[in-house]
Image: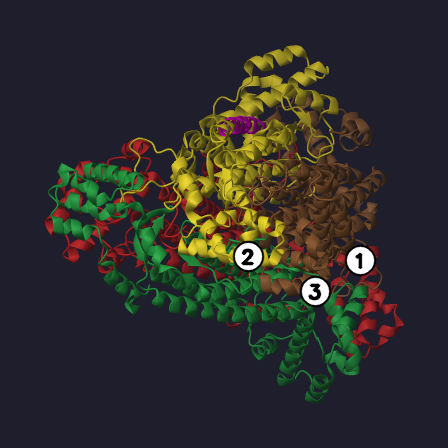
Chain colours: A yellow, B green, C red, D brown
């Protein structure tokens, strides 16, 4: 029983980690080596044909039964196959060590996960692009430190996230390429019973590059890089989720997660519409982030390998990939169906009674000759007054004789953000791409 | 050059980790062992008196100079002392191994830090208690998921934090007691040249308990527990800091960090009053939390010890303690001077037009015979309407014929929170203590 | 499908986290509140008797079915119960908020896990004590930095670990007590519909203490402390596992993990007997250690709570407890059946040709008047020569004229470790207890 | 006072983080923006020439003095410059926000660190290559699980590490390129007072790419990727350091860290030659690894930014870069001067009395018709006997009638590793490159 996987499901990713698939991958890998050996004239083609026809591990249950005795999963798999291949078994797993199969299998699993997750990222990027364009001119207040700063558009916010996920996609592609390696160089990496040529060919048959110059195992820094990348992307999901949570606060009320028909926000308080999906994403990000730690600790192995990484990977392999897949799907769904409240955004821009225009005001005063620090003190004082007493800053300004030098037209220009549209256009323009 | 310590200073804690103090501690420890040996009749009292008078390592610079050659700090210290003690040096460091001195010194450093940090916690608790009482009846809206829930008082929030820090204080006391151990059992913990009696006595002279049944080193789980506790407390600081940041948001505006005269919020936007201190606390919490990881990794040592923990501890020892001290002092200052805006709190309670009273309304309807799920759907619909259309929920209620069963007096009672005062009293009452 | 749990199973712990058990706990908690209300005269006893007889959530599948629509697990549970209780349902979950039930349920789960894990620790301590006594006088070389230091006994090593786990047991007891709290104070912790008396009584009925002065949720520092403790204990397991791995190295060969009949060490190399269980424990420790990070990050919640902790806890709750349970059981099995090779231990003591007696030799020379640094240089030179040229140090000593002052009897004493037995006795003596 | 930096020094990296350099970078960045504005015709060239001549912040002390009042470091810097520029100051920092300068400065610091660290990696790779070639045919036993497996050469081990650091170098180049971005788009990233053209030009003048489509700050995933990469490389250092520690164990004795003249291994045990440098590297790796956590947590910022990342970066910026630089330098020194003991390596190959040839023996038996599982059992039994009773496996083999089918020449071939030289050649061949 596994609460987490059933709670945050992603069947296509989960099945990659199922025992059935793992054993199938092992069989596929063994057969690839057999075929490579045939091509290199090391085993007779007829034997390979017979093996191809008859090779099977029976069932997961059968292999498990044997493993209880051998305490070694790969050996159990081999014994199950042996009973089917009989004499031809001598050409099977020939000159290989368990880890040749297991690590190559792990690589194939991660590669497949990486490909699915890349698809998820693409889907998310598409949704973000569509919504960014849709809200290109949906004005809202930009906030720093949680304090109103200057107006932006909601489209800009989404565009920023779109770009972040484009970076994440590039990184995941690189990390997936890094783990797309196989290894058939035997117990200590010296190719004592499999030639580098056979190994290279078998890898090619599996769509992998060969890991030369390694020990018994594929170097764990390749895998660690992959899990670091998942951790980074999960944190990227958290970044967007956190924004949604903030914008959905009662006092802000600018966006809302989709709320499904019949959904209940709170068992006690019927009025509540809580951003539970994005809160969940923030929580799950902690897990995927934490999983990168063990992946790093797996790197320093004793001499030509120890097996401490194995138990770690059995946990973080499925956990990080399935959870990240679920997170990406969920975020895509949230952003696709996100309810946006432009009216509330417009209201919130007014909340500080014009104090948000303090920077252009300051610059105008400096431009008209007031020393910067003096101007800064004046504007700070007026802005605080506007916020606290809810008096429009522009009105307060008129009462200050030192600001008389400002021409009315310039004051007019300061207190609007007409030119923002044009700047938004230029940021959205393809040439704005980093 | 060390940016972080000068940025987030705490001189009393920093000096504990200074080299001068470290060497003084080593000397104090060596002398304690000498005295214990005198008391056990192992070395002549006259020699001890001479040692007491003349024992000195000269200066930090002198020891450093020797260390450059020996590559061993404790040996350098001993050579510096040897030149002063001459023949009596044979009674000094007698039968001890470096780690006896270094670990006992590290314990004394952590013990002292623990005591200072306990003082910080006490100071913070006092401030929280005072402010909690002051705002016992300062009503504000309670929020869950960032969404308005039901009224509480700001005093209750502070009381909750006060209690959390009382737990933290208890934990730090326990963790400090755990690290208050010394060790004089020689290279592999077998007391081959120092008797358990001498070791125990020397520990007592230093205010420590002896670590029997250990290897060359004091078991690192004792220290790890200490750093875990610092990580927990730092996260407790973050918890309060996060609350202040949320309450200071432009849209909330209920509390404000102290703003010192002349302080500038933003170089560009003079109107800004940013919660920079509490943001800083949230950032620093990440560091102290991360430091607990290496402290754990230090536990599994090779056989009777390896020295990999040493470089780790040179970093996390000063870092975690000084940063946490700075954090506690800063939070205490913030909470002591926190500006509270009860008017804004009162306004915010009204923000949802009464939807926050959905729970008592729901219960009243159920109490008057409406099935729970039907009542829940009705109240949810009305509450959402109240929030979105800014129509008082109470007014919407009157339009619904199914709610006619509710007597007016009960409706009156639902839409106020008069009884909260009494409940606050009982929560504040000493017997409410967990 | 969940590879990790089936690979590293612990059914008694897994079932605590099963949905069946979770729903049963929720029912038990709701009934406890009903009973407390009866005792406080808030609901009629007859209703309670009817509820007690009929209250049921049906099946896990039924609740799951409802949850798909409501997107809220506790509400789904309540709706399932409502169909059985009909009108009496108005007394059920009366005045409670979801989190009252869920957090109290989580506490009960962790409390039960804590109790089972305490039992595991006790079992491990017993095995360590037995084996420590058995090998009290099994001499071996003590090693620091991986380099031979001075003789110890294997019993001392085991005694040290026994003591470490006694500390861990005490810490787990404290951490379990910390999480043994329940909470029935409603949506924002103000007891607006449940009295503190009812809450306290309901907690007592469940064997818990009440968490007063909190928000909607039980403070997460209580749970974080629990997970920190699991992380600490898992690292304690790693410490012992690492020792076994080191001692089983081909070049050391002093101890061996139990090797079950039919077990296969390597699919390629039949001669191998690998310490796979202790390697696995080292790997799993990384996971349990990493889980403490998210538990800490769960502490800072928005205002009166956000729900980001929930998804995190669904993962780390079962994961850390089940894995630690498996680890403790496995380590107990390993240590119980550990094969010890005293012959090899005795051989290894001789490996450095007496260089390991350099400390008593040094002290003897100093005692006979040679300046410490001179003696140190001489002994270092001879010891290195003994190791490199495999010439007994004692023999080399005779060739050095400056050492002539050493009486033969003293030399005899230096190169044996007769007095170790006595010292071992005193360390094993009950009064040696810290 | 900062123990860690003085203990693990790297002056060239430390000076990057010094306040003097930071202020100089800020000045350089401000001047680059001025020049870009001149080129875009936004400010007069004469003013720029005057600014260029007179712009100065005075001294670190002066800026610090102002900051004590403003509580804002960048504002303090500006005020110091203002006193020198007088009226021309209005062209300085024109339309910029603090973070434009601070983030761009942080990027320049990380870029410079990245370049220095790349140089360190290159140096380490060169040393590893040289030593790998030198020990291409220095035979040693390959070990998996700490148990002897099959022969390899020490050159292969070094070649493997060389390749790992080539991967690390590529990753660091990519990560350095990622952080080589500047940002001049104002308070919320909308270029309201600086045009994209000016921003792009100013970045180019600084050797950076512009970060378009961002908020007030440069997206923290760029920096997090950099720190993740440092963590990965530090763990790569640990991997090699761990190998050295293992090979230097008393029982293994195959390699030794350089031991400087006059160095003291232990204050108590003069015979000890401890691998203290590589132990230190393992400890420091824990710190650099832990620092990646806070770097990730810095990513999710509130809206257009909060400043919680700043305090975190002040710590991890210098800490991770300086420590990693020190680690790379130290490892380079260790590997350059590593003492290798080929005689001991040859002796250790013999330690298992031929059991290490169990795989070729097994395959030969299978090749001659023995069923694999039967052969496996036989070879396992004989190999264990050889190891435990120290009887050559080859001799035991002769006593077994079932093995009579093996021709003597084949037996001869099994028990040597003549063909390893050829395979080593092919692995070393340039075409063996992944």
Residue A219 picture location, percent across and down: 67, 36
Residue C214 relative to residue D228: left or right: left
Q: Chain of mark 2?
A: A
Q: Distance between the Cα atoms at labels 2 and 1?
A: 88 Å
Residue A274 picture location, percent across and down: 36, 41
Residue A14 relative to residue B196: left or right: left
Q: Which residues are magenta?
A: A111-128
What's the mark number on residue D61?
A: 3
Q: Does the magenta stretch mainly form a helix, a strand or a loop?
A: helix
Identity of the residue drawn at 29% across and 48% down:
C101
Q: Distance between the Cα atoms at labels 2 and 3?
A: 34 Å
Residue B12 picture location, percent across and down: 59, 71
Residue B59 relative to residue C295: left or right: right
Q: Are marks 3 and 1 on the same chain?
A: no
Q: Nearer the viewer, residue B425 or D169?
A: B425
Residue of label 2: A402
Residue of label 1: C387
Element under disc 3: helix
Q: Is residue B221 above or below residue D218?
A: below
Residue C13 relative to residue A200: left or right: left
Identity of the residue drawn at 14% across and 56% down:
C41
């Amino acid at each position: 029983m596994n609460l987490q996987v059933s709670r945050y499901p992603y069947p296509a990713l989960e099945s990659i980690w199922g025992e059935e698939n793992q054993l199938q991958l092992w069989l596929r890998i063994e057969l690839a080596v057999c075929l490579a050996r045939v091509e290199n004239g090391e085993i007779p083609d007829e034997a390979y044909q017979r093996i191809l026809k008859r090779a099977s591990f029976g069932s997961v249950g059968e292999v498990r039964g044997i493993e209880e005795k051998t305490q070694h999963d790969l050996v159990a798999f081999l014994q199950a196959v042996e009973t089917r291949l009989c004499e031809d078994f001598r050409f099977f797993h020939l000159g290989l060590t368990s880890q040749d199969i297991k690590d190559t299998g792990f690589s194939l699993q991660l590669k497949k996960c990486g490909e699915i997750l890349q698809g998820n990222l693409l889907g998310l990027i598409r949704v973000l692009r569509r919504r960014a364009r849709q809200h290109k001119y949906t004005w809202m207040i930009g906030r720093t430190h949680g304090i109103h700063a200057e107006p932006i558009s909601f489209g800009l916010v989404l565009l920023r996230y779109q770009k972040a996920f484009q970076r994440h996609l590039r990184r995941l592609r690189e990390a997936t390429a890094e783990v797309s390696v196989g290894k058939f160089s035997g117990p200590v990496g010296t190719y004592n019973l499999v030639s580098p040529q056979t190994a290279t060919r078998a890898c090619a048959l599996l769509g992998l590059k060969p890991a030369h110059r390694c020990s018994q195992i594929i170097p764990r820094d390749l895998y660690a890089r992959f899990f670091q990348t998942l951790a980074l992307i999960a944190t990227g999901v958290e970044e967007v989720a956190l924004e949604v949570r903030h914008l959905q606060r009662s006092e802000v009320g600018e966006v809302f997660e989709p709320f499904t028909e019949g959904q209940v926000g709170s068992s006690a308080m019927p009025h509540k519409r809580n951003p539970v999906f994005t809160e969940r994403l923030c929580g799950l990000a902690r897990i995927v982030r934490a999983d990168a730690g063990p992946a790093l600790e797996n790197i320093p192995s004793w001499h030509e390998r120890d097996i401490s990484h194995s138990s770690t990977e059995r946990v973080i392999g499925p956990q990080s990939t399935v959870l990240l897949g679920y997170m990406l799907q969920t975020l895509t769904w949230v952003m696709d169906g996100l309810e946006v409240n432009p009216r509330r955004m417009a209201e919130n821009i007014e909340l500080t009674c014009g104090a948000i225009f303090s920077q252009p005001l300051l610059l105008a005063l400096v431009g008209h000759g007031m020393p910067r620090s003096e101007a800064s003190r004046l504007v700070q004082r007026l802005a605080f007054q506007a916020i606290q007493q809810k008096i429009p800053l522009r009105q307060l300004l008129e009462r200050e004789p030192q600001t008389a030098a400002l021409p009315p037209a310039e004051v007019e220009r300061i207190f609007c953000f007409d030119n923002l549209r044009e700047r938004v256009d230029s940021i959205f323009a393809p040439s704005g791409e980093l």
